[in-house]
């Protein structure tokens, strides 16, 4: 019997398994694919801060470092957010294929058992424990555990079978397509974001440098607003902006933009990362929150084993931790996302104009909102009401 | 006449977007192979969400 079984070896799962193992728990980490980290389903951007909190930086999986971001309104108006001091790079673009493997290895090194090509099928509660059914290299396999951590991504089976999350609606998921392109001519010190209801309905397009003139060129659209699939909008974006370069990789994925879920636990079970809809409703960023959630889930699993209490009531400690760390931000950004979704291109243009040329030193949603409010006093009450 | 989702494997990029929105556990990503089972009731949300346009509905 295991203390903990973790489903999914992405950032959330590996961090959870690592934390459990470091605390002396007997932990099993399963990954349904035969290779950890592929296929990638990510634009790979993360703030330096969000990463450094939980992982020691290793150049092997850093593709590029950036000093800021440039955001473009539909008419091309530019907003620059940048840390101007040299050496103060604020963001990384990762090489997820290597990053994810690195994290899984850290978990293994700490003592976790890691098994690939093994999928979660179902669980059954018995005498306060779980019997977990898996498919391991094509064969059925049943193991008992005290705790199950679902880090099985946006399509989380653990979460939905446990009744913790409900299935996402068309307005709660970004459908994304991305090319890794070579020979892209950009200033590699920045990440680039493009807004517009025609360009990327309910989402945005991006260009993230990956070093050596390569870049992730991608788009996310909200299916409830989009008239075609994400790849269609991506191809149109590349054509419109005359982005030249060869496509050397195709990446697809879906990002939950749900906001904060009420709880990420039930008896014996915790969810972390995209499985708990932990990605940000405005930026779509999910790695930092996943690492954080995985860490907390591991900590609470350790406490639960020590106390021999696996009830939802006890595991709610995990809710308290992730909610006070970043859950409040998911809640706030969901409201802001709903506000921004209602704006037409003309309004987006004029808002961008009102703060274009400003020196925005911090790369965050909050920094933009603060600037917008300074220049648009009529929005103050509106946004205040939204956020209360 | 009932309708059911089918996948064009040449287009599918096995990202799991469809699995995430299916309320009936009708889709499953087995490693990189998308399986659609008899739970599918042809609601079409997966067709709408697929980034590649790899899913469509057929009459069965």
Image (cartoon, rainbow, N blue to C red):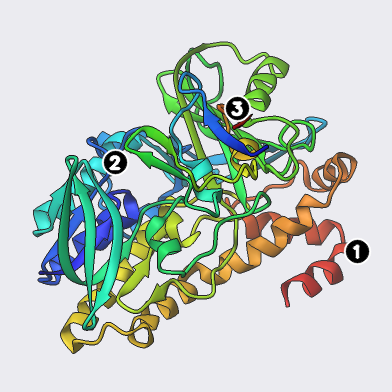
Sort mark 2 into few (<14), some (14-19) or many (20+) by Cα contacts within 10 Å: many
CA gap, disc 3 and disc 2: 30 Å
Q: Where does the image place residue A2, in percent across and percent down from the top left?
A: 13, 68
To the question of a shared chain for discs 3 and 1, the answer is: no
Number of the label disc, if any, that sits on residue A378: 1
Q: Where does the image place residue A123, in percent across and percent down from the top left?
A: 29, 65
Disc 2 on helix, strand or loop? helix
Q: Where does the image place residue A61, in percent across and percent down from the top left?
A: 29, 36
Disc 1 on helix, strand or loop? helix
Decide if residue A269 is on the left or right side of residue A309.
right
Number of the label disc, if any, that sits on residue A99: 2
Chain of the residue where label 2 is placed in the rendered structure: A
Decide if residue A179 is on the left or right side of residue A4.
right
Mark nearer the viewer, 3 or 2: 3
Number of the label disc, if any, that sits on residue B53: 3
Chain of the residue where label 1 is placed in the rendered structure: A
């Amino acid at each position: 019997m295991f203390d903990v079984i973790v489903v999914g070896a992405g950032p959330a799962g590996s961090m959870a398994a690592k934390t459990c193992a470091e605390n002396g728990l007997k932990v099993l980490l399963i990954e349904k694919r035969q290779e950890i980290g592929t296929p990638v389903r990510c634009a790979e951007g993360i703030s330096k801060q969000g990463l450094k909190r939980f992982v020691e930086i290793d150049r092997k999986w850093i593709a590029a470092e950036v000093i800021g971001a440039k955001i473009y309104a539909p008419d091309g108006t530019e907003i620059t957010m940048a840390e101007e001091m040299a050496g103060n790079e604020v963001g990384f673009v990762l090489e997820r294929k290597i990053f994810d493997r690195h994290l899984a290895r850290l978990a293994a090194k700490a003592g976790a058992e890691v098994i690939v090509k093994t999928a979660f099928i179902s669980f059954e509660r018995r005498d306060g424990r779980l019997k977990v059914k898996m498919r391991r290299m094509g064969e059925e396999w049943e193991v008992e555990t005290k705790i199950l951590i679902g880090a099985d991504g946006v399509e989380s089976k653990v979460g939905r079978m446990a009744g913790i999350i409900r299935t996402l609606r068309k307005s709660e998921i970004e459908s994304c397509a991305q090319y890794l392109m070579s020979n892209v001519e950009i200033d590699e010190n920045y990440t680039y974001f493009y807004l517009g209801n025609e360009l990327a309905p309910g989402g945005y397009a991006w260009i993230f440098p990956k070093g050596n003139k390569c870049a992730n060129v991608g788009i996310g659209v909200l299916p409830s607003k989009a008239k075609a699939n994400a790849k269609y909008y991506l191809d149109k974006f590349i054509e419109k902006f005359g982005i030249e370069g060869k496509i050397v990789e195709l990446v697809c994925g879906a990002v939950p933009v749900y906001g904060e879920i009420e709880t990420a636990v039930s008896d014996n079970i915790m969810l972390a990362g995209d499985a708990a809809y932990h990605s940000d409703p405005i930026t779509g960023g999910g790695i930092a929150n996943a690492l954080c959630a995985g860490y907390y889930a591991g900590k609470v699993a350790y406490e639960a084993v020590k106390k021999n209490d696996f009830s939802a009531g006890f595991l709610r400690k995990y809710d308290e931790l992730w909610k006070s760390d970043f859950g409040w931000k998911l809640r706030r950004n969901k409201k802001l996302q709903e506000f921004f979704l209602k704006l037409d291109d003309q309004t987006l243009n004029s808002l961008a104009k009102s703060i274009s040329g400003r020196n925005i030193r911090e790369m965050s949603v909050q920094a933009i909102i603060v600037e917008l409010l300074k220049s648009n006093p009529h929005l103050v009450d509106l946004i205040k009401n939204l956020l209360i | 006449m009932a309708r059911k989702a089918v996948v064009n494997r040449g287009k599918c990029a096995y990202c799991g977007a469809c699995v995430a929105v299916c309320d009936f556990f009708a889709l499953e990503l087995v490693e990189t192979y998308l399986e659609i089972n008899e739970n599918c009731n042809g609601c079409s949300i997966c067709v709408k969400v697929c980034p590649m346009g790899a899913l469509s509905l057929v009459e069965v």
